[in-house]
Amino acid sequence: MRLTTTAMIVALAASPALNAETRDWKGEGELGLLITSGNSDETNLNARLGLVHEVEKWRNIGEFRSNVSESDDTTTAERYRAALETNYKFTERQYWYLRGAYEDDRFSGYDFQSSVTTGYGNRVWESGTRSFLDLSIGAGYRFNKLDVPDPDTGSRDEDEAIARLAGQFDYALSESALFRQTVSSELGLDENNVITESETSLQATIVDNLSMKAAYRVKHVSDAPEGSRKTDTITSLSLLYGF
């Protein structure tokens, strides 16, 4: 049921963009599904929807992700994430950004994690239309809710001012292959909790707008909730449809 619901949400969310008649919109839908049976029954689903709306002075970015794994009818991973960002472009390469993110990870020790940041970004290098390096720096606020109260304070709330550093590097290996590296780090200014995320991916066109994508994601929480691991990793192989 969870897998069906997730797939329906992604499909419904993609419909307006797929039907959009304006060239200002572009995006990509990603789906990876692995089902095994025999000595153990296991199902893994990774889904992602990315949207970009860009005009002369503004760029709006939305990303929605889900990851669900079940083994022998037991859920072993369940994660949902949404991030929205708007950019105001001072020049062709420099911009101001405002970003909000929300994550619900059932096995992270958090009920949910959320942050709002704003700051300055710069496309410091660009070659053609598919190769570039974006760097940004900003500050904001983070509010997380723990699954269980902190043993020291007795509170379930984690809130603090943060600084955020991020980068994205895209490099076109050929007309049909693209390497992408994204990394971000949110540094807590009060509790010194640092949350760092990275994704390394390689995608290759199969036919027209359909591509195969291999990716490796890492998330590290320096001060993870008690009983939770500091580092999570996801390796995925999925189909990617660009529109």
Image: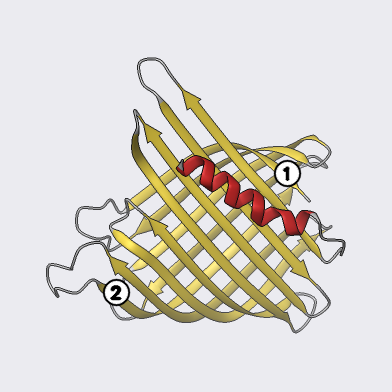
Amino acid carrying mark 2 in the image = Glu
Q: Amino acid at mark 1?
A: Tyr
Q: How is the image coloured?
A: secondary structure
Q: Work out whether residue 52 or residue 15 is closer to the camera in this orientation and state it.
A: 15
Mark 1, other Cα within 10 Å: few <14 / some 14–19 / many ≥20: some
The numbered disc on residue 97 is none
Quadrant of residue 120 within the rendered picture: bottom right
Residue 51 lies, in percent from the top left, at 69, 60
**How far, Cα to Cα, is label 2 from label 1?**
38 Å
Residue 170 vs 213, above or below: the answer is: below
Q: Are marks 2 and 1 in contact (CB under 8 Å)?
A: no
Q: Label 2 neighbourhood size at 10 Å, few (<14), some (14-19), many (20+)?
A: some
Q: Residue at x 30, y 54 (%)?
A: 230
Q: Secondary structure at mark 2?
A: strand
- Specify whether 234 is left or right of 146: right
Q: Is residue 94 left or right of residue 107?
A: right
Residue 234, percent from left and from top: 46, 43
Foreground of the two, 148 or 183: 148
Q: Position of residue 10 (x, y in %)?
A: 61, 50
Residue beneath disc 1: 241
Which quarter of the figure has residue 149? bottom left
Q: Classify mark 1: helix, strand or loop.
A: strand
Q: Which comes sooner in the sequence, label 2 or label 1?
A: 2
- Disc 2 marks which residue? 158
Query: Is residue 135 visible to us here?
Result: yes
Identified at 34% across, 80% down, the residue is 160
Going by the picture, which residue comes out furthest to the bottom?
Answer: 90
Tell me residue 164's x, y (percent).
48, 73
Vertical placement of 212 versus 242: above or below?
A: above
- Residue occupying the point 64% across, 41% down: 202
Q: Is residue 204 above or below residue 198?
A: above
